[in-house]
């Protein structure tokens, strides 16, 4: 073999070897980067799962605390109601406590029914709910009779039906007639008349 041919073949072998090494390097580098990304994503998923578990535990703890603190009772003489009253109570629950816990929804409904029994705000659930300047959402006449949509509305309707059909109430809330959100301080609210706080609402048996 001539010297020139030898060097040509040697150069080709070296070039092929370098190319092979480069290909292997690129392959393993890409694989490493991909594995690294997968590892990062797996860790992110694990962290998300942990956070969800912690949130669920926290929410369950809050529910358990509410169950320990409040007792559901069934009144012997539940109010008489029509389908329109069921709608009005569901609307009040939806607008006033749609994002609250079940206990928060029941408490708002109970204020509505306590007001009905008192006779001071009207002789039907709808009249109580639509009474002038009582429940803020009802001041907007354009939405009074609109049917909402979505899971919060579905839940509000279910709660309204359970409350009316079973006479569900919270013990110690039989005299609750007023409430306000915890981020406001109305001049009618007096600590001596306060009953308790559920979720974001503070409930009272009297107003100044």
Image (cartoon, rainbow, N blue to C red):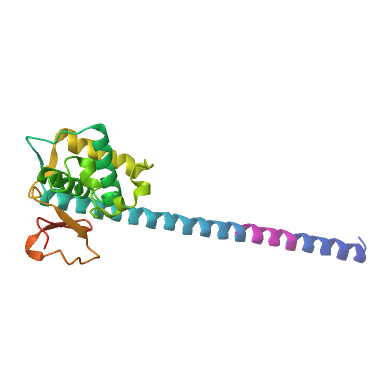
Q: How many marks?
A: 0
Of 45 and 16, nearer the camera is: 45
Residue found at x 83% / y 64%: 11
Of 21 and 165, nearer the camera is: 165
Is residue 26 shown in magenta?
yes
Q: Quadrant of residue 198?
A: bottom left
Of 138 and 148, nearer the camera is: 138
Q: Residue 190 at what x, y percent from top left?
A: 11, 65
Left or right? Give the position of 14 relative to 70: right
Left or right? Give the position of 37 relative to 101: right
Quarter of the figure with the C terminus: bottom left
Q: Magenta residues?
A: 18-28
Left or right? Give the position of 40 relative to 146: right
Residue found at x 33% / y 42%: 153
Q: Quadrant of residue 75?
A: top left
Q: Residue 72 at what x, y percent from top left?
A: 12, 43
Q: Can the viewer see residue 164 in this picture?
A: yes
Q: Residue 204 at what x, y percent from top left?
A: 12, 57
Residue found at x 20% / y 36%: 162
Q: Quadrant of residue 185?
A: bottom left
């Amino acid at each position: 073999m001539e010297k020139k041919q030898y060097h040509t073949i040697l150069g080709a072998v070296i070039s092929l070897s370098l190319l092979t090494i480069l290909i292997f390097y690129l392959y393993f580098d890409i694989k490493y980067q991909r594995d690294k990304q997968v590892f990062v994503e797996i860790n992110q998923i694990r962290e998300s799962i942990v956070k969800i578990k912690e949130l669920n535990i926290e929410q369950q703890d809050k529910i358990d605390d509410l169950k320990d603190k409040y007792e559901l009772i069934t009144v012997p003489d539940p109010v008489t109601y029509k389908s329109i009253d069921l709608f009005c109570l569901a609307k009040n629950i939806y607008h006033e406590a749609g994002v609250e816990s079940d206990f928060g929804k029941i408490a708002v409904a109970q204020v509505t029914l306590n007001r009905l029994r008192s006779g001071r705000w009207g002789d039907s659930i709808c009249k109580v709910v639509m009474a002038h300047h009582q429940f803020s959402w009802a001041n907007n006449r354009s939405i009074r009779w609109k049917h909402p949509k979505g899971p919060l509305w579905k839940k509000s309707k279910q709660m309204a039906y359970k409350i009316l059909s079973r006479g569900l109430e919270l013990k110690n809330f039989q005299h609750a007639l007023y409430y306000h959100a915890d981020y406001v301080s109305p001049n009618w609210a007096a600590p001596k008349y306060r009953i308790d706080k559920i979720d974001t609402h503070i409930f009272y048996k009297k107003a100044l």
